[in-house]
Image: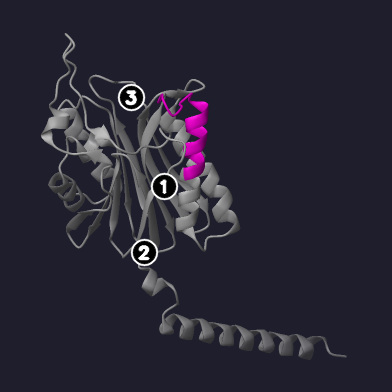
Amino acid sequence: MEIAVGSQPGIWDRTSAEAHVADQLAPGVVLLAVADGFGLVRGTPVAKVAVELVRDNLRKRVRRDTRDPRAHLLAAFSNANARVFAQSGSSDDYVAGGASMTATLIVEDRAYLAHVGKSRAYLARDGALSTLTEDDALAGDEWTTARSSVPTEMRTGPLLTRTLGTQATLDASVMHVRLMHADALVLTTGGVHAFVGTDEIAYALDASTTSADVATRLLDVLKFRGAASAGTVIVGRALTDWGETLAPAPSAVRNAALSMTAFAAATLAAVAVLHAVFAP
């Protein structure tokens, strides 16, 4: 899989607490994750703490067993949620920090996704782009255009109904898809899809030849539009046709067999010559 990661700071929150992971956890197992949030855990942004907790937990699990990636993702999100909730200073009456996160655990030709909050995952296949996640937010213009009654009239954002670290227990949404050759996975934080439409993501994928080109195009859109919030994007393109690579082609097997036969015949001939020369 060809993977590219990029981030673009916002014009307001240039120190926005966003984080990502794009790591190989074990042979044939890759983790892609994006997160954005608020609050700190011992001086470190919650988003960074959350993705690292999920990564480290999954690394331990998949090294022992890769048979149930869905259960591994649920356990990793639950563990990270409990630790962030406890260490950030949150309680049932007070929320000190939280994060939206979308993580994809790729095991061979399967992509398992876990999600909370407003980060997103997209799948591009045969020129069509589909959204794999649903925002955990109350939708509607009344939530994005409402203004407070205080003199500053601060603009409010969407009201999130579920994030990592804002409650004592968490059940993430999990799904999986089988990856085909030339499929592309795109993970974005809320700062990206707030300013970039799905049609623009689809166009970037269609007009680009590499994952890095796609990431650059999307982040350039954020920069051009003067996005108030930072944005992070991960693009992964499947470049392997697993169905064809599970077994070598018949011709390859035949050629290999012929080569071994020829090698064996040459070896026997060489032994015969040496025996004739050095025999008493």
Classify residue 145 as left or right of residue 183. Answer: left
Type of amino acid under label 3: Ser
Q: Secondary structure at mark 2?
A: loop
- Disc 2 vs disc 1: Cβ atoms closer than 8 Å? no
Q: Secondary structure at mark 3?
A: loop
Please name whichever residue, 146 or 266, is drawn nearer the observer in this view of the structure. 146
Q: Which residues are magenta?
A: 78-95
Within-10-Å neighbours for mark 2: few <14, some 14–19, many 20+: some
Which residue position is annotated with label 3?
A: 16
Where is residue 38 shown, x and y percent of the image?
37, 26
Please name whichever residue, 191 or 175, is drawn nearer the observer in this view of the structure. 175
**Outermost residue toward the top?**
151
Which residue position is annotated with label 2?
A: 240
Type of amino acid under label 2: Thr
The answer to if 82 sits in the magenta stretch is yes
Classify residue 80 as left or right of residue 123. Answer: right
Where is residue 40 shown, x and y percent of the image?
44, 23
Comes first in the chain, label 2 or label 1: 1
Query: Distance between the Cα atoms at labels 2 and 1?
Result: 32 Å
Comes first in the chain, label 2 or label 3: 3
Please name whichever residue, 170 or 233, is drawn nearer the observer in this view of the structure. 170
Within-10-Å neighbours for mark 3: few <14, some 14–19, many 20+: some
Within-10-Å neighbours for mark 1: few <14, some 14–19, many 20+: some
Type of amino acid under label 1: Asp
Eye-nearest disc, 3 or 1: 1
Where is residue 251 shown, x and y percent of the image?
42, 84
Report the residue at 42% width, 84% height from top.
250
Comes first in the chain, label 3 or label 1: 3
Which residue position is annotated with label 1?
A: 171
Q: Secondary structure at mark 1?
A: loop
